[in-house]
Amino acid sequence: MTFARPDHISDLDTLPRMPAWVTSGRSETPEDVAFLSGAALNHLHLVLAREEVPKALLRARLTLRAAEACVAFSGRPERAGELRDAVHLLRPGDLPGPAGEVYLAWRRAMERPVSIKALGRALPTLGPGQIAAWLDAGQGAPVRRAGLVLEAVLREAPRADVPGLILADAALSQALGWDHLVPLLAPGLKRADLRKRGEDLRLACHRALTSSTVEAVRLAADLARRAAHLKAVAPKLRAKGAGDAVEMFLTRDAVAPSALPLPDRAARRLCDRLVDLGAVRELTGRDAFRLYGV
């Protein structure tokens, strides 16, 4: 979708871009691999410090990518659209199914600041002591720490890909000083990487983080532009509760009209209006039970 670019958001072009030597760098030695991943993560750290980046929305989109990767690791066919449906179509008492459970675990892990309690909410089959023990397995620099946590989980529970990747990303985020979990490892790893151990696994984590962080920076720049456009058109919205609705769009991957703080018909009209203004997109292609997102 092409957005209008008023003068007051043209400064988004100043959002720092990932250096070309990171995106095109060839990592042939362990030192090169580690250097490039560190450079990429440092650049993302700078981008996350920018006020114009909608951080909650960025985490939500990265969460969907992480869940999609984990579902693919398990051999299931569900992709982003099906994962959204698995969660948003739930009614009280419904079960989300295996793919939906994966997505919900990632969402719960990133919604609140990283803590044993928050991770326990995301991974209810694990006790606080087990979560703490696995996190304590991570020592050293951020990527090494994440790799050691992932290895500790997979050594004791070889099929626990989702808990392992969630805890590894939690360890990485904590080591980098980020309050919330930023899902990065899963989208960059290959299924075969999860069978590696020791230095091979840590090198795979470095490579995965370089590629996924480059994509995260690109996504951050795109979402910053889209969020600025949504904020720019917000004064044109006359519906009562439109301000709260806009805030929901700025923090969630997808929103159903029924979730907005407006009456049913008013919510649908608001979504249609935002689509007409180029501020949000309809994400499903359906005529009924539509989902909208920035």
Image (cartoon, rainbow, N blue to C red):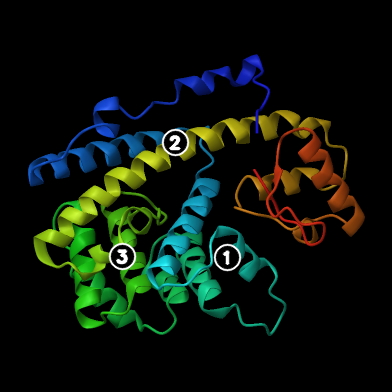
Q: Is residue 22 left or right of residue 9?
A: left
Q: Quadrant of the N terminus?
A: top right
Which class describes the residues within 10 Å of circle 3: few (<14), some (14-19), or many (20+)?
Answer: some
For mark 2, give the secondary structure: helix
Question: Can residue 121 be seen in this snapshot?
Answer: yes
Find disc 2 in the rendering and name its residue: 218
256 is higher (above) or lower (below) than 162: above
The label on residue 191 is 3
73 is higher (above) or lower (below) than 206: below
Amino acid under label 2?
Answer: Arg
For mark 1, give the secondary structure: helix
The label on residue 233 is none
Q: Nearer the viewer, mark 2 or mark 3?
A: 3
Q: Hey, which quadrant is residue 14 in on the image? A: top left
Asked whether the residues under the numbered discs 3 and 1 touch, taking CB atoms below 8 Å apart as contact, a structural biologist would say no
Q: Quadrant of the C terminus?
A: top right
Q: Nearer the viewer, mark 3 or mark 1?
A: 3
Find disc 1 in the rendering and name its residue: 83
Instruction: Give the percent coordinates (x, y) of residue 63.
Output: 48, 57
Asked whether the residues under the numbered discs 2 and 3 touch, taking CB atoms below 8 Å apart as contact, a structural biologist would say no
Along the line of sight, the residue nearer the viewer: 189 or 223? 189
Which class describes the residues within 10 Å of circle 1: few (<14), some (14-19), or many (20+)?
Answer: many
Amino acid under label 1?
Answer: Leu
For mark 3, give the secondary structure: helix
124 is higher (above) or lower (below) than 88: below
Task: Write the residue at 29% across / 33% down.
Answer: 23
Distance between the alpha carbons at the discs numbered 2 and 3: 24 Å
